[in-house]
Image (cartoon, grey):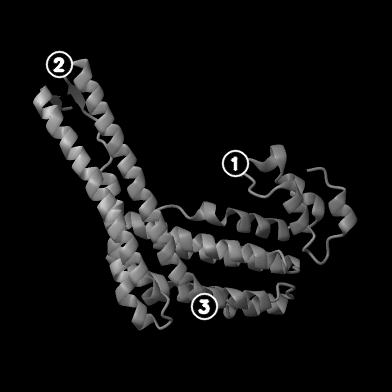
């Protein structure tokens, strides 16, 4: 706990410092726009060796923005005492300006991070697109074969590692976590679309569950923050597709859900049940969800 006492003259000096800080922030954002424009064509070059250097520069840029957003956040953990109410109001105004500056830095950071992710995802998408050709109408022999020779998950994770992990040393921990989670968002969104277009046997549902577990395990090792919630919808799809019979969903739904929070709507649950080749449409329609 700190006790700070400032007089009116010092208040004026603080006001000038804050005004200067805001001006410098505006100048920084202007430079950021110019810098982004110059890098845009470099970031789109397909060869990894050609994009590595500008991406490193980009990472340093967004890292600086992330650190600035923390530094400019007003520290409210100390008591500031001023002799005059007018001075106190002026300080409150200054702190408010600093808070707005912090938010602006965060917006710049997010925009920069999304731009960085956009240079990586095109290199991952071709592997994701091959998932559309993988069958999940599996026999016992096919399921056993997939256990020995994984059809796509390891290839996807290799593509992610190749195009993402080398960025970790040049980014702050928080920025790298944000980057990884944005990549996960891209992957999961695409996988959900692909899986909703497939047909499944029960063993195919078990295969999807195994695939989802592998993804969660690997991405958990890449991030300091939990990633399990990112895969919740995909995991719940696998749970549904692995059921013995249609009515078994009621053992996991509503009051029987226990600690599970369903991310799928009743309509989506019915749609996923309809992907099973052995579930009858009339049994699905009769469910009361």
Tell me if residue 211 can be seen.
yes
Vertical comparison of 34 with 86: above or below: below
Q: Residue placed at 55% from the left, 77% from the top?
A: 127
Q: Residue placed at 84% from the left, 53% from the top?
A: 284
* Residue 178 position within the rendered picture, expressed as x and y whole percent measured from the top left: 40, 56
CA gap, disc 3 to disc 1?
Answer: 33 Å
Check disc 1 and report the residue beneath it. Answer: 259
* Residue 273 position within the rendered picture, expressed as x and y whole percent measured from the top left: 77, 57
- Give whichever of 90, 267 is nearer the camera: 90
- Residue 155 tag number: 3
Query: Which numbered mark, 1 or 2, is in the foreground of this view?
Result: 2
- Residue 130 tag number: none
Query: Which quarter of the image is occupied by the C terminus?
Result: top right
- Give whichever of 162, 243 is nearer the camera: 162
Vertical comparison of 107 with 97: above or below: below
Check disc 2 and report the residue beneath it. Answer: 83
């Amino acid at each position: 706990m700190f006790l700070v006492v400032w007089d009116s003259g010092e208040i004026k000096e603080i006001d000038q410092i804050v005004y200067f800080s805001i001006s410098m922030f505006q100048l920084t954002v202007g430079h950021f726009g110019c810098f982004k424009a110059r890098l845009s064509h470099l970031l789109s070059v397909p060869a990894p060796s050609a994009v590595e250097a500008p991406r490193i520069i980009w990472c340093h840029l967004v890292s600086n923005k992330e650190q600035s957003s923390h530094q400019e956040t007003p520290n409210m953990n100390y008591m500031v005492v001023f002799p005059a109410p007018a001075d106190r109001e002026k300080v409150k105004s200054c702190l408010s300006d600093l808070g707005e500056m912090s938010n602006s830095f965060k917006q710049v950071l997010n925009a920069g991070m999304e731009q960085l992710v956009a240079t990586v995802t095109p290199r991952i998408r071709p592997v994701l697109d091959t998932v559309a050709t993988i069958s999940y109408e599996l026999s016992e022999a096919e399921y056993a074969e997939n256990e020995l020779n994984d059809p796509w998950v390891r290839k996807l994770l290799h593509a992610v590692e190749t195009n993402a992990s080398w960025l970790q040393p040049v980014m702050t921990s928080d920025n790298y976590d944000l980057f990884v989670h944005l990549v996960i968002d891209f992957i999961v969104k695409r996988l959900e679309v692909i899986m909703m277009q497939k047909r499944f046997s029960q063993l195919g549902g078990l295969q999807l569950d195994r695939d989802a577990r592998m993804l969660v395990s690997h991405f958990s090792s890449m991030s300091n923050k939990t990633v399990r919630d990112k895969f919740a919808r995909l995991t719940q799809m696998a749970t549904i597709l692995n059921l013995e019979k249609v009515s078994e969903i009621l053992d996991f739904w509503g009051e029987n859900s226990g600690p599970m929070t369903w991310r799928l709507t009743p309509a989506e649950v019915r749609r996923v049940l309809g992907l099973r080749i052995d579930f009858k449409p009339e049994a699905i329609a009769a469910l009361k969800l």
